[in-house]
Image (cartoon, rainbow, N blue to C red):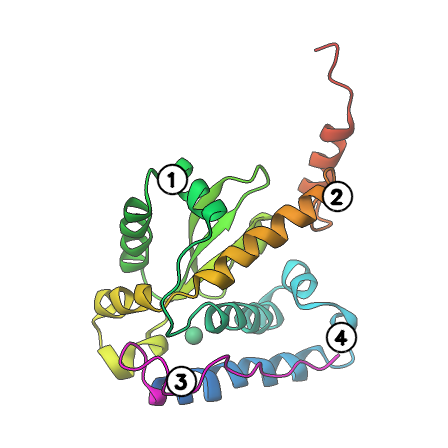
Amino acid sequence: MAYTLINLPFDKHTLEPAISAETLEYHHGKHHQAYVNNLNALIKNTKFETLYLDEIIRQSDGAIFNNAAQVFNHDFYFQGMQREESQPSEELLELINRDFASLEAFKEHFLATATTLFGSGWIWLALDESGNLRIESHSNASNPLLNGHTPLMTCDVWEHAYYIDYRNARADYLKQWWEIINWEFVSQQLIDFNEKRSSHPNVCNDNDELCNYIDTLEQTDHSNT
Ligand code: MN
């Protein structure tokens, strides 16, 4: 299948001054678009042509992996922002309090991780197989799907995400980005994760060896141990 660039879920001026229209013109209109175009050209007439994006990410490497993951990561990033103020759902807040002590402590930890990632990459909030929240720092195009984890939120810390508006001041960009998080989108990812888990309690969300192994363990009778 051919992939298409998602439309931004907001007008390009909406996020100003945190993120300018000019940044979005480049970041969405040029960088994100280029990843989509490259991916379509690279998978044409290959076994990847019929796969879903998450499957391509799990099964490919090199240029196909880089472009597929960058399409996925940018789709996630742009959908995860909005101008209207929003709050984590009660359910998400409970998990944040459980795993990071408080929203404020989580914010501090997340932004510090994003500030200190060396070079280009992405900072994610993700759920592991047991439903625990984790802050994950990934270089280049990498993301939590590679660990078998479920992404809830991401921040792009490639320089192209902030250089027009903030030059080299990544920490200033991060501070502003925190104010435009679309918590409804983030909270919805938790709802989707829980629904998937309750409908397939023993099944991982992908087919790699580790998940098959976990499935086997979960299906084993441990009553004698
Ligand atoms: Mn980017």
Give me the C-alpha separation between circle 2 and circle 3.
38 Å
How many marks overall?
A: 4
Residue placed under numbered mark 3 in the picture: 24
Residue labelled 4 has its Cβ within 8 Å of some atom of ligand 1: no
Question: Neighbour class for label 2 at 10 Å: few (<14), some, many (≥20)?
Answer: few
Q: Which mark is residue 60?
A: none
Looking at the rendered image, the disc whose residue lies closer to the viewer, 1 or 3, is 1
Magenta residues, start to end: 1-22
x, y percent for residue 36: 59, 81
Question: Neighbour class for label 1 at 10 Å: few (<14), some, many (≥20)?
Answer: some
Give me the C-alpha separation between circle 4 and circle 2.
27 Å
Q: Which mark is residue 200?
A: 2
* Magenta stretch encompasses residue 201: no
Residue placed under numbered mark 1 in the picture: 97
Precedes in sequence: disc 2 or disc 1: 1
In the rendered view, tell whether residue 194 sits above or below residue 176.
Answer: above
Looking at the rendered image, the disc whose residue lies closer to the viewer, 2 or 3, is 2
The residue under label 3 is which amino acid type? Leu
**For the residue labelled by badge 2, is the local secondary structure a helix, a strand or a loop?**
loop
Residue placed under numbered mark 4 in the picture: 49
The residue under label 1 is which amino acid type? Asn
x, y percent for residue 68: 60, 71
